[in-house]
Amino acid sequence: MLNVPRARKTPPLPAPALRRWFRRRLLQWYDKHGRDLPWRETRDPYHILVSEVMLQQTQVDRVLPKYREWLDRYPTFEALAEAPEHDAVTTWYPLGYNIRPRRLHAIAREAVESYGGQLPQDEETLLSFKGIGEYTAGAIRSFAFGERAAILDTNVARVLFRVFVGRGDPKSHAMKRRLWDISWAVLPHKHVFDFNQALMDFGATVCSARAPQCQPCPLSSRCRTYPFDATSSRRASKVTTRS
């Protein structure tokens, strides 16, 4: 008799009441504990883009001084497009991952040549820029243009997986697509800017990867992984990866 593997169930979307509870608790937390960051004080699409690209794989405390320096030197798409690519890479130092300033430079040139020095607002056109993926497009639409757009970076994915899913491989393609679905499901129609910023802050400061603050967590009563055990989670991840 053949052993046919059972299909893995797709995690259900949170029920409407749970979505409302999650939004309320998260926004209450953000109102008290949200970080004061300079890119939260602007709606300039270029400034938002610079911050998002810098924050890829780089901690906030390292980005802060470089973000200010970069905008002092290249305050607009036009200023960046006119600069030699080598100068942009030099200014970027020591953030690393030097493909990022090169992509920013290429985006600036395309924005100037094709869109009058502006970033387009619609998702399809944003995604046509090399270097702007699904997350960055959502961040630009949400933070710069005030649109209802979901986001899913590493911190957001971690929060949504732990609170609403709790089992499976969070790094699998299928799970990432489901976490996008959940991010859209819990996204409010109002206060989208604050909500998305709250998700990122919460993942960075409370629901962290290795040492989450589970005891004071305002989401613990509904969290599927509370209390989080990093050791057992790593073991489960290894088993899931091998299967």
Image (spheres, grey):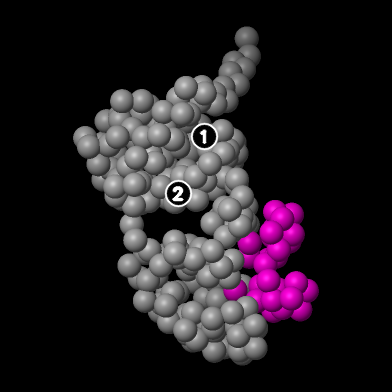
Q: Quadrant of the N terminus?
A: top right
Q: Secondary structure at mark 2?
A: helix
Q: Secondary structure at mark 1?
A: helix
Against 80, residue 5 (above or below) is above
* Residue 213 left/right relative to 97: left
The residue shown at (37%, 51%) is 201
Q: Badge 2 local density, few (<14 within 10 Å), some, or many (20+)?
A: some
The answer to whether residue 12 is seen in the rendering is yes
What is the magenta range?
Answer: 104-132
Q: Is residue 111 magenta?
A: yes
> Residue at label 2?
194
How far separated are the C-alphas under marks 1 and 2? 13 Å
Figure check: 139 above or below 164: below
Percent coordinates x, y for residue 2 in the rendering: 63, 14
Q: Which residue is mark 1?
A: 186
Count the marks: how many?
Answer: 2
Q: Residue 44 in the image: state x and y as whole percent.
A: 56, 68
